[in-house]
Amino acid sequence: MQATLGLVAAALVAAALPARADLTTVKVTIPAIAAYYAPDFIAIDKGYFAEAGLQIEIVEAGGGVGTPALISGTVDFSASPAAALAAILRGAPLKIIYTMADRATYQLWSTEPNVTSLAEMKGKSVGIISRGDTFEIAMRLTLIQQGFPQDWLSYTALGFGAQARDAAMASGSLPAVIVAESDLEPLRGTPALARSHLIVDMYKTLRWPYTGMATSDKLLATKPEMVERFLGALVKGVRYMKAFKPETLAILAQREPQAPAHAIEIDYDAVIPTLTDTGTASDALIRQDLDVRAGLMNIPKDKLRPASEIYDYRLLEKATAALDAAHWQPSR
């Protein structure tokens, strides 16, 4: 863990902007430059964080790195709540404080021409990023939703990044792969995609607490006002993202200049309908997700921590109420 945290610290130094003495520095990990994290970039570029007295240092790091850093206090917030949730269920003193989306842009594709339904996939392996990740959680929730047992499929970890999953689809090395909709762009018009079949579009069929923000119990206890200000700025970023598409695409393009403009737009268009209205998830969606994770982690349901010890939306609700009371709306 120390080596991992050292890498995070080095990345933080590299990503840091010149410090302003009048602002409190806040360190945030995000897993990728993607539309789901546009509100963070918007809140930086539009000055929402600065207005809240905060200077943000963004680190691109997956939940496997971000969560240990959050626990140690190396970073203040992590945009990988799924990884934080797994740690919380093992006893980590963390909370999920914002739920950005209630579904993901995931799709299950078969690479075998003769397999066209989930019923025909018994015993087949599905490519994901890593065991217990959000791809596997989404697949397990889908199995429950469609009445299949949890052992209907097996899972193969392909590692971080869309390229590995795209390669598995292109080669047919696995019977099936879960991809985000935007991951398919490099495969458009190729024989690999032509021979494959979309089995389940989870974007259309599955709702669950997806991405958002997590922090530590310590920060909530010692700096609640700062957390509230951070969340208020983030909510402003979400509202701006929903209101101004071209401007949001431009902000994302600045962060990822190598990405084709049409791919950024596809990602944006897919993400917008998934964003929650309130930044929260319902008790029913939370409980469904927790039950699946408990099964993966061999936690008896009667030993599962209550949702109130995992999710804490109080400061988010306070920040949102203040914005609504002020009739705040984004402007260009």
Image (tube, rainbow, N blue to C red):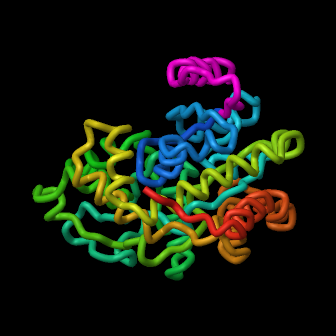
Residue plotted at (48% across, 57% down): 135
Give the number of callouts: 0
Which segment is the magenta one? Answer: 1-26
| The one of 218 and 49 positioned closer to us in this rendering | 49
| The one of 241 and 205 positioned closer to us in this rendering | 241
Residue plotted at (60% across, 52% down): 234
Residue 82 seen: no
Instruction: Find the residue positioned furthest to the right.
Output: 221
Residue 207 seen: yes
- Whether residue 121 sits left or right of residue 41 in the image: it is left
State the image coordinates of residue 116 (x, y, percent, origin top left): 27, 75
State the image coordinates of residue 214 (x, y, percent, origin top left): 69, 48
- Whether residue 86 is in magenta: the answer is no
Up-down relation of residue 142 to residue 161 (above or below): below
State the image coordinates of residue 299 (x, y, percent, origin top left): 77, 58
Up-down relation of residue 242 to residue 58 (above or below): below
State the image coordinates of residue 169 (x, y, percent, origin top left): 25, 53
Residue plotted at (81% across, 40% down): 219
Up-down relation of residue 200 to residue 65 (above or below): below
Residue plotted at (53% across, 82% down): 147
- Whether residue 315 sits left or right of residue 135 in the image: it is right
Quadrant of image for the C terminus: bottom left
- Whether residue 70 sits left or right of residue 12 in the image: it is right
- Whether residue 11 is in magenta: the answer is yes
